[in-house]
Image (cartoon, rainbow, N blue to C red):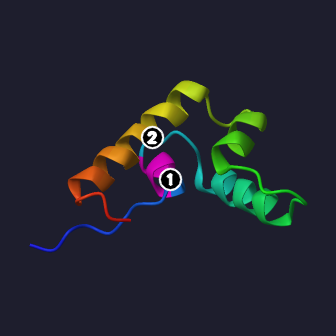
Amino acid sequence: MEPRPHRLLGVILVDLGYVRVNEMQEALRLQMTGTSHRLLGAILIEQGWLTRERLSEALAIQLKEDWGRGGQG
């Protein structure tokens, strides 16, 4: 059985229903057009589309999935 591919944070957040696809697209656009690198989670929180608690949950899921894959990323 092959390991599942690494799920990006944005995919996890949308899959959980924590953010909408259009919100994720806008956050990614803001991230790419900014003059300094900002973390996706920070942008989503700044825009009011995500709470810190839900970001923490999604990051924990991502970490758990990565560890389940042998920690390879």
Q: Amino acid at mark 2?
A: Ala
Q: Residues within 10 Å of mark 1 (few under 14, many from 20)?
A: some
Question: Relative to residue 73, is residue 41 depicted above or below?
Answer: above
For the residues marked 2 and 1, what is the alpha-carbon distance in whole angstroms? 7 Å
Question: Helix, strand or loop at disc 1?
Answer: helix
User: Residue shown at 74%/44% (left/top)?
Assistant: 43
Q: Residue at x 68, y 60 (%)?
A: 25
Residue sitting at x 58%, y 44% = 19
In the rendering, at what x and y percent does residue 39 appear?
69, 49
Q: Is residue 32 left or right of residue 55?
A: right
Task: Specify the farthest residue to the right.
Answer: 35
Q: Position of residue 45 (x, y in %)?
A: 70, 35
Q: Is residue 5 magenta?
A: no
Q: Nearer the viewer, residue 9 or 13?
A: 9
Specify the farthest residue to the front.
71
Residue under label 2, please give it: 58
Q: Position of residue 67 (x, y in %)?
A: 27, 51
Magenta-colored span? 11-15
The residue indicated by pointer 1 is 9
* Secondary element at tag 2: helix
**Residue 66: where, in percent of width, then height?**
32, 55
Left or right: where 35 falls relative to 44: right
Quarter placement of the C terminus: bottom left
Magenta segment, prevailing SS (helix, strand or loop): helix
**Amino acid type, callout 1:** Leu
